[in-house]
Amino acid sequence: MTEWFFDDLAKGLDNGTISRGRALKLAGGALLGAVVPSLFPREAEARISKRRRCKRKGGTWLDAADPASPCRCATPCESTNAIPCHNNEDCRCLPTIEGEGFCGLGSIASTCTSSADCAEFGANWRCIPCEDVPGGHVCAEPCPT
């Protein structure tokens, strides 16, 4: 397409059917049309789409989530719209107080201020925000993988 476009443009300039101003606008438009798509890669569009879908589900998109975690969209512990993970309805995506996604069971233990406080229950237990309990944070058990 580009070859015949510039051939026709050159012929039009040569025989006077296209003005120089019009030729510059057409060439500029062709150049702009070639450059603009590279400024907005599809990955960015997909990420925006995922964030919107997460918000529609009542979740929070976690930018700081662990890349290995399946949970980038999480709901609070008291949410009735739990977002399942690992294709297991008992497992749900929860946000940790550190801002990472965590695939956990709804089970809770004592209150905490960081995920380190939950180590007494098990190696991978995490501290999650939960407004329904005194202190606002509880330890949650990880889902079996």
Image (tube, rainbow, N blue to C red):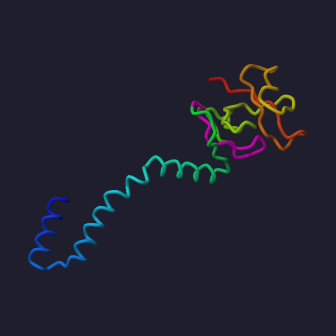
Horizontally, residue 18 falls left or right of residue 26, namely left
In the rendered structure, does residue 78 fall within the stretch colored magenta?
Answer: yes
Looking at the picture, tell me which residue is in the foreground, 68 or 5.
Answer: 5
Horizontally, residue 33 falls left or right of residue 57, namely left
Prevailing secondary structure class for the magenta stretch in the rendered image: loop
Horizontally, residue 12 falls left or right of residue 72, namely left
Q: Quadrant of the rendered structure where residue 113 is?
A: top right
Q: Is residue 135 above or below residue 36?
A: above
Residue 54: x %, y % from top left: 61, 49
User: Bounds of the magenta span?
Assistant: 68-82
Q: Quadrant of the rendered structure where residue 102 is?
A: top right
Horizontally, residue 79 falls left or right of residue 40, namely right
In the rendered structure, does residue 29 fall within the stretch colored magenta?
Answer: no
Residue farthest along the front direction in this orientation:
20
Looking at the picture, tell me which residue is in the foreground, 46 or 76.
Answer: 46
Residue 50: x %, y % from top left: 55, 48
State how many labels appear.
Answer: 0
Residue at figure coordinates x 25%, y 70% from the top left: 26
Quadrant (top left/top right/bottom left/bottom right) for the C terminus: top right
Residue farthest along the left direction in this orientation:
15
Residue at figure coordinates x 17%, y 64% from the top left: 6
Residue at figure coordinates x 70%, y 44% from the top left: 75
Quadrant (top left/top right/bottom left/bottom right) for the N terminus: bottom left
Q: Quadrant of the rendered structure where residue 22 is?
A: bottom left
Residue 60: x %, y % from top left: 67, 47
Residue 35: x %, y % from top left: 34, 57
Q: Is residue 116 above or below residue 100?
A: above
